[in-house]
Image (cartoon, grey):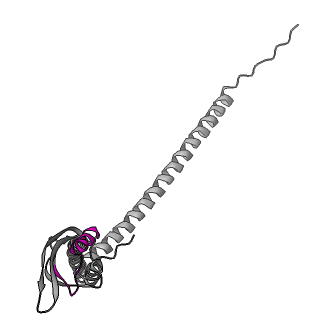
Amino acid sequence: MASYRQKEINLYRRYQQNVKRSYSKWLIYAVSVAVILIFCFAWDGWLDWRCAELSKEISETQTYLADPANLQAKETSQSVHSQLAAVNTEIKKLSKAFAALESYPHMNSMLLSEIEACGGEAITISITGYQALSGKLEYIAVSSQVIDIPAYIKSLEQSNLFKGVSYTGYDYNKDKYFYRINVSFFLSETAGKAVVQ
Protein backbone atom coordinates (compact mmCIF):
# COMPACT_ATOMS: atom_id res chain seq x y z
CA MET A 1 0.00 0.00 0.00
CA ALA A 2 1.19 3.34 -0.87
CA SER A 3 2.04 5.60 2.00
CA TYR A 4 0.99 9.15 1.79
CA ARG A 5 2.66 11.86 3.58
CA GLN A 6 0.29 13.82 5.49
CA LYS A 7 0.37 17.53 5.02
CA GLU A 8 0.24 19.37 8.26
CA ILE A 9 -2.23 22.16 8.32
CA ASN A 10 -1.35 24.67 10.94
CA LEU A 11 -3.02 27.93 10.08
CA TYR A 12 -1.58 29.83 13.00
CA ARG A 13 2.03 29.08 11.99
CA ARG A 14 1.29 30.12 8.43
CA TYR A 15 -0.14 33.37 9.68
CA GLN A 16 2.98 34.08 11.72
CA GLN A 17 5.23 33.44 8.69
CA ASN A 18 3.17 35.80 6.53
CA VAL A 19 3.33 38.49 9.20
CA LYS A 20 7.15 38.10 9.40
CA ARG A 21 7.51 38.49 5.62
CA SER A 22 5.21 41.49 5.58
CA TYR A 23 7.11 43.06 8.50
CA SER A 24 10.51 42.66 6.77
CA LYS A 25 9.07 44.18 3.56
CA TRP A 26 7.84 47.21 5.43
CA LEU A 27 11.12 47.51 7.27
CA ILE A 28 13.03 47.61 3.95
CA TYR A 29 10.66 50.28 2.63
CA ALA A 30 10.95 52.32 5.82
CA VAL A 31 14.77 52.18 5.80
CA SER A 32 14.88 53.17 2.10
CA VAL A 33 12.56 56.12 2.69
CA ALA A 34 14.61 57.17 5.73
CA VAL A 35 17.87 57.06 3.73
CA ILE A 36 16.33 59.13 0.93
CA LEU A 37 14.93 61.66 3.43
CA ILE A 38 18.32 61.94 5.17
CA PHE A 39 20.04 62.52 1.82
CA CYS A 40 17.44 65.16 0.85
CA PHE A 41 17.78 66.97 4.18
CA ALA A 42 21.58 66.89 3.91
CA TRP A 43 21.46 68.28 0.36
CA ASP A 44 18.99 70.95 1.41
CA GLY A 45 21.22 71.88 4.34
CA TRP A 46 24.27 72.19 2.08
CA LEU A 47 22.29 74.34 -0.39
CA ASP A 48 21.10 76.58 2.46
CA TRP A 49 24.69 76.96 3.72
CA ARG A 50 25.96 77.75 0.19
CA CYS A 51 23.20 80.32 -0.37
CA ALA A 52 24.11 81.98 2.93
CA GLU A 53 27.78 82.12 1.88
CA LEU A 54 26.92 83.62 -1.51
CA SER A 55 24.58 86.15 0.10
CA LYS A 56 27.41 87.18 2.41
CA GLU A 57 29.80 87.61 -0.57
CA ILE A 58 27.19 89.64 -2.47
CA SER A 59 26.64 91.83 0.58
CA GLU A 60 30.39 92.43 0.96
CA THR A 61 30.71 93.26 -2.77
CA GLN A 62 27.80 95.71 -2.62
CA THR A 63 29.34 97.37 0.45
CA TYR A 64 32.68 97.63 -1.38
CA LEU A 65 31.03 99.12 -4.49
CA ALA A 66 29.04 101.63 -2.43
CA ASP A 67 32.16 102.89 -0.64
CA PRO A 68 32.80 106.54 -1.73
CA ALA A 69 36.57 105.95 -1.98
CA ASN A 70 36.00 103.09 -4.40
CA LEU A 71 33.47 105.10 -6.40
CA GLN A 72 36.05 107.88 -6.72
CA ALA A 73 38.66 105.38 -7.91
CA LYS A 74 36.19 104.05 -10.49
CA GLU A 75 35.45 107.57 -11.78
CA THR A 76 39.19 108.31 -11.97
CA SER A 77 39.74 105.07 -13.87
CA GLN A 78 36.97 105.91 -16.35
CA SER A 79 38.37 109.42 -16.81
CA VAL A 80 41.88 108.09 -17.47
CA HIS A 81 40.41 105.53 -19.90
CA SER A 82 38.63 108.33 -21.81
CA GLN A 83 41.80 110.40 -21.92
CA LEU A 84 43.76 107.40 -23.17
CA ALA A 85 41.20 106.83 -25.94
CA ALA A 86 41.53 110.50 -26.97
CA VAL A 87 45.34 110.25 -26.99
CA ASN A 88 45.19 107.06 -29.10
CA THR A 89 42.93 108.88 -31.59
CA GLU A 90 45.43 111.74 -31.80
CA ILE A 91 48.29 109.26 -32.27
CA LYS A 92 46.45 107.69 -35.20
CA LYS A 93 45.86 111.12 -36.74
CA LEU A 94 49.53 112.05 -36.30
CA SER A 95 50.62 108.73 -37.79
CA LYS A 96 48.52 109.46 -40.87
CA ALA A 97 49.96 112.98 -41.07
CA PHE A 98 53.53 111.66 -40.79
CA ALA A 99 52.79 109.04 -43.45
CA ALA A 100 51.49 111.81 -45.73
CA LEU A 101 54.59 113.91 -45.06
CA GLU A 102 56.80 110.93 -45.76
CA SER A 103 55.18 110.60 -49.17
CA TYR A 104 56.53 114.05 -50.11
CA PRO A 105 60.11 114.41 -51.36
CA HIS A 106 62.58 115.56 -48.72
CA MET A 107 64.29 118.85 -49.43
CA ASN A 108 67.61 118.35 -47.68
CA SER A 109 71.37 118.47 -48.14
CA MET A 110 71.40 114.90 -49.47
CA LEU A 111 69.06 115.95 -52.30
CA LEU A 112 71.13 119.06 -53.09
CA SER A 113 74.29 116.97 -53.18
CA GLU A 114 72.65 114.56 -55.64
CA ILE A 115 71.54 117.45 -57.86
CA GLU A 116 75.03 118.97 -57.82
CA ALA A 117 76.52 115.56 -58.63
CA CYS A 118 74.49 115.50 -61.87
CA GLY A 119 76.36 118.61 -63.08
CA GLY A 120 79.78 117.73 -61.84
CA GLU A 121 82.19 120.10 -60.11
CA ALA A 122 81.74 122.89 -62.66
CA ILE A 123 78.18 123.71 -61.54
CA THR A 124 76.82 125.13 -58.31
CA ILE A 125 73.13 125.56 -57.70
CA SER A 126 71.03 128.27 -56.12
CA ILE A 127 67.45 127.37 -55.12
CA THR A 128 64.87 129.94 -56.25
CA GLY A 129 61.66 128.14 -55.30
CA TYR A 130 60.22 124.96 -53.82
CA GLN A 131 56.58 123.80 -53.52
CA ALA A 132 56.39 120.89 -51.11
CA LEU A 133 52.83 119.93 -52.05
CA SER A 134 53.59 119.40 -55.74
CA GLY A 135 57.30 118.63 -55.31
CA LYS A 136 58.26 121.38 -57.80
CA LEU A 137 61.81 122.67 -57.33
CA GLU A 138 63.23 125.64 -59.23
CA TYR A 139 66.87 126.59 -59.18
CA ILE A 140 69.56 128.37 -61.08
CA ALA A 141 72.64 126.38 -62.03
CA VAL A 142 75.72 128.62 -62.14
CA SER A 143 78.93 127.73 -63.96
CA SER A 144 82.07 129.76 -64.56
CA GLN A 145 82.98 127.45 -67.45
CA VAL A 146 81.29 126.74 -70.71
CA ILE A 147 79.34 123.51 -70.25
CA ASP A 148 77.29 121.26 -72.48
CA ILE A 149 73.82 122.34 -71.31
CA PRO A 150 71.84 119.66 -73.22
CA ALA A 151 74.08 116.98 -71.69
CA TYR A 152 73.52 118.51 -68.23
CA ILE A 153 69.73 118.54 -68.69
CA LYS A 154 69.86 114.96 -70.01
CA SER A 155 71.80 113.83 -66.91
CA LEU A 156 69.08 115.45 -64.77
CA GLU A 157 66.34 113.69 -66.75
CA GLN A 158 68.07 110.32 -66.38
CA SER A 159 68.37 110.74 -62.61
CA ASN A 160 65.78 108.96 -60.48
CA LEU A 161 65.35 112.19 -58.48
CA PHE A 162 62.95 113.82 -60.91
CA LYS A 163 59.67 113.05 -62.62
CA GLY A 164 60.11 115.76 -65.22
CA VAL A 165 62.73 118.42 -65.97
CA SER A 166 61.97 121.79 -67.51
CA TYR A 167 64.83 123.86 -68.92
CA THR A 168 63.85 127.48 -69.53
CA GLY A 169 67.11 128.82 -70.96
CA TYR A 170 70.37 130.32 -69.83
CA ASP A 171 72.17 133.68 -69.83
CA TYR A 172 75.74 134.89 -69.48
CA ASN A 173 76.85 137.56 -67.03
CA LYS A 174 79.70 139.41 -68.71
CA ASP A 175 80.66 141.33 -65.60
CA LYS A 176 81.11 138.29 -63.38
CA TYR A 177 81.97 135.77 -66.10
CA PHE A 178 79.47 133.02 -65.34
CA TYR A 179 76.63 131.21 -67.02
CA ARG A 180 73.17 130.95 -65.41
CA ILE A 181 70.90 128.04 -66.40
CA ASN A 182 67.24 128.23 -65.31
CA VAL A 183 65.94 124.77 -64.42
CA SER A 184 62.71 123.59 -62.79
CA PHE A 185 61.44 120.08 -62.25
CA PHE A 186 59.17 117.94 -60.16
CA LEU A 187 60.88 115.76 -57.60
CA SER A 188 60.10 112.07 -57.43
CA GLU A 189 58.65 110.67 -54.19
CA THR A 190 62.00 109.11 -53.20
CA ALA A 191 64.02 112.29 -53.77
CA GLY A 192 66.04 113.26 -50.70
CA LYS A 193 65.41 109.94 -48.98
CA ALA A 194 67.87 107.17 -48.32
CA VAL A 195 66.38 104.43 -50.50
CA VAL A 196 67.37 100.89 -49.57
CA GLN A 197 68.03 98.86 -52.72
Instruction: Name the residue at 70% across, 25% down.
Output: 10
Query: Taking 129 as reference, is 89 left or right?
Result: right
Does 175 appear above or below 195? below
The answer to which quarter of the image holds residue 148 is bottom left
Does 13 appear above or below 5? below
Query: Taking 12 as reference, is 51 left or right?
Result: left
> Is residue 135 shown to the viewer in this render?
no
Query: Taking 44 as reference, is 74 left or right?
Result: left
Closest to the observer: 59 or 7? 59
Instruction: Name the residue at 66% across, 33% down.
Output: 17
Residue 95 location (% of width, % of height): 24, 73
Residue 68 location (% of width, % of height): 22, 82
Query: Taking 103 as reference, is 184 left or right?
Result: left
Q: Which residues are magenta?
A: 139-158
The answer to which quarter of the image holds residue 140 is bottom left
> Is residue 117 shown to the viewer in this render?
yes
Specify whether residue 155 is painted magenta: yes
Residue 112 location (% of width, % of height): 25, 82
Residue 165 location (% of width, % of height): 19, 69
Specify whether residue 19 is painted magenta: no
Does 116 appear above or below 164? below
Quadrant into which the C terminus falls: bottom left
